Image (cartoon, grey):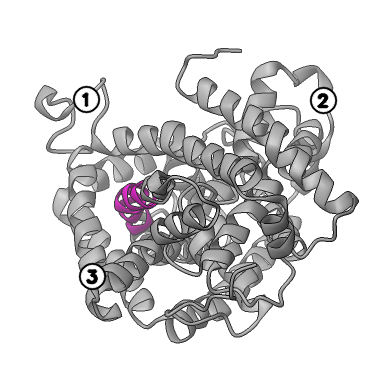
Amino acid sequence: MPARRTSIHGEWSSRLAFILAATGSAVGLGNIWRFPYVTGESGGGAFVILYLVCVAAIGLPVMMAEIMLGRRGRQSPINTMRTLAREEGRSPAWQYVGWLGMAAGFLILSFYSVIAGWTLAYALRTVSGVFNGATAEGVAAIFEEFISDPERLLAWHTIFMVMTTIVVSRGVKSGLEQAVRYLMPALFVLLVVMVGYAMNTGQFEQAVNYLFTPDFSKITSGVVLNAMGQAFFSLSLGMGAIMIYGSYLSHTASIPRTAAIIALMDTLVAILAGLAIFPLVFEYGLAPSAGPGLIFQTLPIAFGQMPGGALVGFLFFVLLVFAAWTSAISLVEPVVAWLVENRGMQRVKAAALTGLMAWLCGILALLSLNLWSGDARFTFFDKGFLDLFDWVTSNVMLPLGGLLISVFAAWIMTRESSRGELGLANGMGYTLWRVLVRYVTPVAIGLILLNKTGILTP
């Protein structure tokens, strides 16, 4: 085994700090609306069981692999993959796995910041009583007016990107760790408060049944693919974020145990979100299948009708801000680490440059919602920039990145290298991980990739 490397960027002060950071990276806006919605539409408790199996068989092994690669390389994803490939006597072309992940994370950050800016705006709108007594048509009109104003979207996009850049510029311990040390507990507290409020509505039991009553008749091949995809995407895999966070993890921390805790916490957030949201949806006769529109066009109707709705709505959107913020800082970090390592930049300058470039790219996304909407000159494959960035990253880049990480960890790294870094003896635990990441996860991620790109339709 080579001499143990150290990261020039620092190290998490504890395993808990890493868990909070990695969970913050995994927990995002998708956890709040997509998991509950997909669960309800896909068999309730049956889908939850299927999802947990997919997390254990697909998400967790890949997360362990990504953390393992990060900790062994102790550099940005690009340099880590180049170093480890050289260490195993393989082609330096494996560094392009790092490039793929960083590019995906950067593109996601650019449009994610735009949408996260909406949550900031809606927190203030809700607490100011804008939605009080508003009808469905009124809320829809407010949303349409909001996204049709490029200057307003630009202002909120700018504020969120500045918030994110400031955190990353302060470094691992003073920036990333301090942020997640407060934001993640606050996020959980807000979720519990929201669930407590929802329990006092008359429809909490209906929401529990909606989410957890098994209906195996709804389990189709399409639902299985959805569960596989949700398990993969909800853990923030394939974009370099978990790899760079793993590079700051102490060599004494157990990767399998740590990854399992992160997966459980990520799933817990998604389930709590469902228990917080759907009692309100059912109480006020709203559509549980609203999907992405649930946040900005459906729930505000409930907040405008319920007693104390302005405060409850404000807390909900602050919760979303925290979830988006912790995810965004993990998307900036891989690029910043690379600039520091390869261009000799000071961290503050690297963070500012990364934030500026993502901000500029985000302008393309926000203009595709209004000034450029429907303009053939700015439409590609019938998609504006925001939809295009979302489709390319979610359907191609992330699954491909996860697939290549699995192949490298299980087929390129030697048994001695992976076993030593994972800290597993050559027993049942290591054998199970190796079988899963060698055979099960590549096939599963390959199916996800084929399904997402439309090549394979259930």
Mark 1 or 3, closer to the camera:
3
Mark closer to the observer (2, 3): 3
Q: CA distance from mark 1 to mark 3?
A: 34 Å
Residue 47: x and y, percent?
75, 32
Q: Which residue in the protein does label 2 denote?
A: 215
> Can residue 189 be seen in the rendering of this structure?
yes
Circle 2 residues within 10 Å: few <14, some 14–19, many ≥20? some
Q: Is residue 181 magenta?
A: no
State the residue at coordinates (72%, 57%).
Answer: 416
Horizontally, residue 311 falls left or right of residue 101, namely right
124 and 14: which one is in front? 14
Please name the amino acid that badge 2 sits on: Asp
The residue that appears at 53% across and 21% down in the rendered structure is: 451
Residue at image coords 75%, 44%: 434
Question: Any mark on residue 12, and which?
Answer: none
Q: Which residue is mark 3?
A: 343
Seen as rendered, the residue at the extreme left is 377
Q: What amino acid is at disc 1?
A: Phe
Q: Earlier in the sequence, mark 1 or mark 3?
A: 3
Q: Quadrant of residue 265?
A: bottom right
Using the image as rendered, state which of residue 359 and residue 270 is in the foreground.
359
Q: Tell me, for residue 380, which label it has, or none.
A: 1
Q: CA distance from mark 2 to mark 1?
A: 39 Å
Q: Which residues are magenta?
A: 102-117
